[in-house]
């Protein structure tokens, strides 16, 4: 689904919430009644945003195609924050209003449903934004975050007891309740479908000291080179959590593959995977592929393991014998970190339009380019930046630096695409 269409639907939902509010309050009342009116405005808007955060985190393929999952997760975070701010304002204002008007505030049971949901949302949002600082494992905060699926029905009960049937607000409530149910059912069906279609590990290959590739056989998936998948490994009867990895194989290959670098709890165990182990694969996701744009000759910038989407794209160009010019700048600390070196050399020798420039930041005896990827280095290797389209994938600091260099060379942001290995 095109992102413009999704944005239009969101705008319509918010407009509906605004109109339902405008028709439900009495603007003729003055004084502290304005606290109530304002509070009742924040409630439906907050509810819409809180609902939207579920839509944007549910990996709904139809929507993801137009956005890319990283962008959807960013929107999820923005909607979550906006929703939380609005419902907090709603609660604060209505409490003050009730104290002024009635001298009491918590006199109906269903207010407590709202308060409990609000406190719950505050806790889950707080943990989501601080989990690294407070030292929580990724899986732990994610499991805590799932509590939001229980908190939303709680907030819906609170809303139900404060609106009148047949009003516009009632129909908004009904619509959100039905859509939320649909999102939950979608997620459950997806999990069941994945479990029924397992993959089998066919090869575990060491690519460098700390980099391993896993190959999988199973149901065929249509994907573009550069896209990624979520993988769960079932080893010794233990199921891992789902981790995102670029599909390092090309769509032309027989088997799917991923190439994880050892980084933390899960990636450290990749090497212990055995041929025959089962895997559950949810794919494809992402829009980071030269096939998606085609506005110019592709120039790839990889940092370390950020090479994987480009390997997929280059393997695709090679297998398809595309008459395609392409340049790869690949930054690493030293030669020791390289994987796929022989394959890249072979591609360079056999694909006339393809060049690799290896850049080492930490190897004084390296005979090629040294240091970091700077504008001058880019210009030295490209005849011109005109007619080129730039793709960047690597650690956040490296990606930001390269994008900055490109902007300083007056490359239009529309011609720069990047993939972060973080959702
Ligand atoms: C689109 C995309 C493509 C990727 N492709 C590759 C690749 O080709 N090769 C590669 O080596 N790495 C890739 N990664 C990164 C890879 O997903 C993480 O390195 C891996 O999940 C870390 O798990 P860990 O338990 O070993 O490390 P940890 O130390 O537990 O986590 C390190 C960081 O990885 C992220 N992370 C951890 N677990 C998850 C999870 N279950 N879901 C999502 N993110 C998580 C978090 O940001 C966390 O802070 C990719 C990530 C994304 C988003």
Image (cartoon, helix red, strand yellow):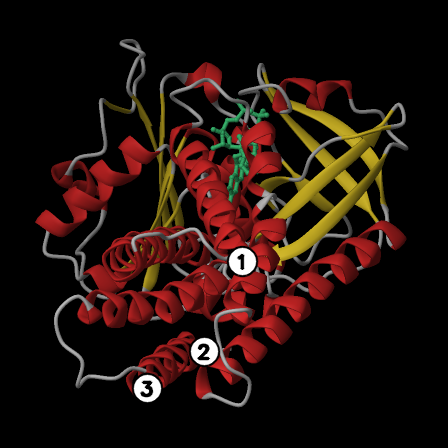
Residue 57 in view of the camera:
no
Labels 3, 2: front one: 3
Residue 194 picture location, percent across and down:
80, 53
Residue 115 picture location, percent across and down:
46, 48
> What residue appears at the point 53 percent right and 75 percent down from the top-left corner?
173
Crowdedness near tag 3: few (<14), some (14–19) or many (≥20) residues, C-alpha within 10 Å:
few
Q: How far apart are marks 2 and 1 (CA)?
A: 39 Å
Q: Distance between the residues labelled 3 and 2?
A: 26 Å
> What residue appears at the point 79 percent right and 24 percent down from the top-left corner?
273
Q: Which mark is residue 110?
A: 1
> What residue appears at the point 41 percent right and 80 percent down from the top-left corner?
13
Residue 167 in view of the camera:
yes
Most foreground residue, 38 or 192: 38
Q: In which quarter of the image is ligand 1?
A: top right
Q: Residue 19 carries which label?
A: 3
Most foreground residue, 341 or 390: 390
The mark that comes first in sequence, 3 or 2, is 2
Labels 3, 1: front one: 1
Crowdedness near tag 2: few (<14), some (14–19) or many (≥20) residues, C-alpha within 10 Å:
few
Helix, strand or loop for disc 3: helix
Residue 158 placement, left or right of 381: right
Taking 104 as reference, is 39 above or below it?
below
Q: In which quarter of the image is residue 335?
A: top left
Most foreground residue, 221 or 93: 93
Taking 240 as reference, is 2 above or below it?
below
Residue 77 picture location, percent across and down:
39, 50
Helix, strand or loop for disc 2: loop
Most foreground residue, 28 or 209: 28
Crowdedness near tag 1: few (<14), some (14–19) or many (≥20) residues, C-alpha within 10 Å:
some
The mark that comes first in sequence, 3 or 1, is 3
Residue 135 picture location, percent across and down:
46, 17
């Amino acid at each position: 689904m095109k992102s413009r269409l999704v944005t239009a639907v969101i705008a319509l939902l918010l407009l509906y919430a605004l109109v339902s509010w405008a028709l439900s309050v009495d603007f003729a009342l003055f004084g502290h009644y304005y606290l109530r009116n304002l509070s009742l405005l924040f409630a439906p808007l907050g509810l819409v945003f809180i609902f939207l955060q579920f839509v944007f985190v549910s990996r709904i393929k139809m929507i993801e195609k137009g956005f890319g999952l990283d962008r959807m997760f960013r929107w999820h975070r923005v909607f979550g924050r906006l929703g939380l701010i609005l419902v907090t304002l709603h609660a604060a204002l209505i409490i003050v209003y009730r104290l002024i008007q009635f001298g009491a505030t918590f006199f109906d049971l269903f207010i407590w449903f709202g308060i409990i949901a609000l406190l719950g949302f505050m806790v889950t949002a707080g943990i989501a934004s601080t989990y690294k600082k407070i030292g929580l494992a990724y899986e732990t905060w994610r499991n805590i975050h799932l509590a939001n699926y229980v908190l939303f029905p709680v907030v819906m009960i609170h809303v139900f007891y404060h609106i009148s049937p047949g009003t516009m607000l009632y129909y908004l409530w009904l619509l959100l309740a039905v859509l939320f149910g649909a999102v939950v059912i979608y997620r459950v069906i997806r999990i069941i479908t994945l479990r029924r279609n397992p993959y089998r590990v066919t090869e575990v290959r060491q690519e460098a000291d700390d980099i391993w590739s896993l190959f999988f056989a199973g149901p065929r998936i249509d994907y573009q080179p550069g896209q990624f998948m979520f993988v769960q490994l079932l080893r010794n009867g233990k199921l891992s959590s789902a981790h995102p990895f670029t599909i390092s194989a090309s769509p032309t290959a027989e088997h799917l593959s991923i190439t994880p670098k050892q980084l933390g709890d899960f990636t450290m165990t990749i090497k212990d995977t055995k041929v025959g182990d089962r895997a559950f694969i949810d794919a494809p996701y992402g829009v980071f592929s030269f096939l998606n744009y085609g506005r110019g000759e592709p120039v790839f910038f990889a940092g370390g393991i950020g090479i994987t989407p480009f390997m997929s794209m280059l393997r695709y160009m090679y297998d398809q014998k595309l008459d395609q010019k392409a340049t790869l700048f690949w930054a690493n600390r030293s030669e020791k970190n390289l994987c796929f070196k022989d394959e890249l050399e072979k591609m360079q020798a056999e694909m006339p339009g393809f060049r690799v420039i290896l850049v080492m930041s930490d190897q004084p005896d390296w005979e090629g380019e040294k240091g970091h990827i700077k504008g001058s280095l880019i210009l030295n290797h490209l005849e011109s930046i005109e007619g080129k389209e730039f793709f960047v994938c690597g650690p956040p600091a490296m990606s930001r630096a390269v994008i900055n260099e490109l902007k300083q060379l007056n490359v239009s942001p529309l011609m720069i695409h990047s993939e972060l290995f973080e959702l």
